[in-house]
Image (cartoon, rainbow, N blue to C red):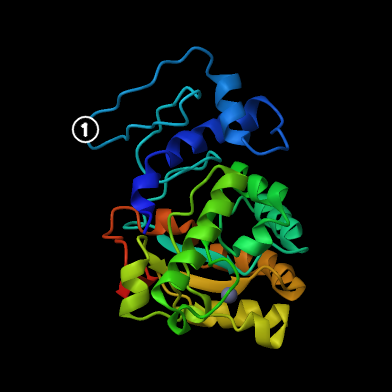
């Protein structure tokens, strides 16, 4: 099985290139986006060497000058560093997209200067490549929700691997970002699934049931009732009602002292291991 972790080494380099691209130039529409950005923005840069535990050796494609990535989680959109040991952090997560309402959601999140993590389906990512790029440029985290949303517990080992690898390759090709966490559809996982996923499995501890009631007020009220320090809130950006709920939900969270962060930020400084399922900053399942 291809290793997710092996590919992580190139991820920060591509992300940095994307950040620079967002500041300096419009993103080219065709694939090879990060590659072109790196070439445009870092002319003549030599292949870097990074030492110690604070960086990675970033090696992009052979004809692309690699770039040095900062240590720590990706923060493409400049926001103050958040220490979730001190702050009351919460991760907003959105599954099953992108969809036709996702751009509106990105507008809401940008207006509130609030990051989120998107658990994307490979098959939907293919339909909205520009939306993926916008997510990256605006500082959101991209995760994998498999290619076409089958319950992984019902599949063979090779089928599970196919679901994970296909989605990851599509997301990486379209956005330049390799999805470094996986959310299994329906939260369905077992020891076989866990062993085959070479990334942390990110579940949730707050289920808004947004897919069921389709009521913006309920999305916010359920989330606010159940949220705790370190929570991961589950929502779905394919529903218009959920997108409508987000501005008020973010207002209420901030009013109660919560700091919305990405999943990577939520687990920064914590054990966050491959083949392990997490329901919040403090809970493994
Ligand atoms: Zn789903």
Name which residue lies at 55% across and 60% down: 167
x and y percentages locating residue 19 in the rendered image? 56, 34
Name which residue lies at 64% across and 50% down: 132
Name which residue lies at 54% across and 66% down: 93
Count of picture labels: 1
Does residue 205 appear to the left or right of 57 in the view shown? right
Name which residue lies at 34% across and 56% down: 86
Q: Nearer the viewer, residue 130 or 281?
A: 130
Q: Nearer the viewer, residue 134 or 37?
A: 37
Q: Quadrant of residue 201?
A: bottom left
Does residue 236 appear to the left or right of 42 in the view shown? right
* Residue 205, placed above or below residue 54: below
Asked whether the viewer can see residue 199, the reply is yes
Mark 1 sits near ligand 1, with its Cβ under 8 Å away: no
Q: Quadrant of ligand 1?
A: bottom right
x and y percentages locating residue 104 in the rendered image? 76, 58
Does residue 201 appear to the left or right of 118 in the view shown? left
Give the class, few, some or many, for how many residues have Cα within 10 Å of label 1's Cα (few <14, many ≥20): few
- Which residue is the site of mark 1? 52
Asked whether the viewer can see residue 143, the reply is no
x and y percentages locating residue 175 in the rendered image? 60, 45
């Amino acid at each position: 099985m291809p290793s997710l972790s092996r590919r992580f080494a190139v991820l920060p380099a591509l992300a940095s290139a994307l950040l620079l691209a967002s500041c300096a130039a419009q993103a080219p529409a065709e694939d090879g986006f990060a590659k072109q950005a790196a070439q445009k923005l870092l002319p003549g840069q030599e292949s870097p060497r990074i030492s110690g535990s604070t960086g990675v050796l970033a090696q992009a494609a052979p004809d692309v000058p690699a770039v040095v990535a900062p240590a720590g989680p990706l923060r493409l959109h400049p926001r103050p560093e958040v220490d979730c040991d001190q702050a009351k952090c919460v991760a907003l997560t959105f599954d099953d997209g992108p969809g036709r309402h996702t751009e509106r959601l990105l507008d809401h999140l940008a207006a509130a200067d609030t990051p989120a993590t998107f658990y994307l389906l490979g098959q939907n990512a293919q339909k909205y490549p520009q939306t993926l790029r916008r997510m990256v440029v605006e500082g959101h985290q991209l995760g994998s929700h498999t290619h076409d949303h089958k319950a992984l517990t019902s599949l063979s080992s090779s089928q599970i691997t196919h679901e994970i690898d296909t989605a990851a390759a599509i997301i990486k090709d379209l956005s330049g970002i390799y999805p470094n966490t996986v959310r299994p559809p329906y939260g369905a996982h077992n020891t076989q699934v866990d062993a085959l996923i070479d990334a942390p499995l990110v579940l949730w501890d707050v289920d808004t049931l947004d897919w069921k009631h389709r009521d913006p007020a309920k999305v916010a009220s359920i989330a606010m009732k159940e949220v705790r320090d370190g929570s991961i809130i589950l929502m779905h950006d394919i529903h218009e009602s959920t997108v409508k709920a987000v501005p008020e939900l973010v207002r209420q969270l901030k009013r109660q002292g919560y700091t919305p962060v990405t999943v990577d930020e939520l687990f920064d400084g914590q054990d966050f291991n491959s083949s392990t399922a997490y329901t919040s900053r403090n809970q493994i399942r």
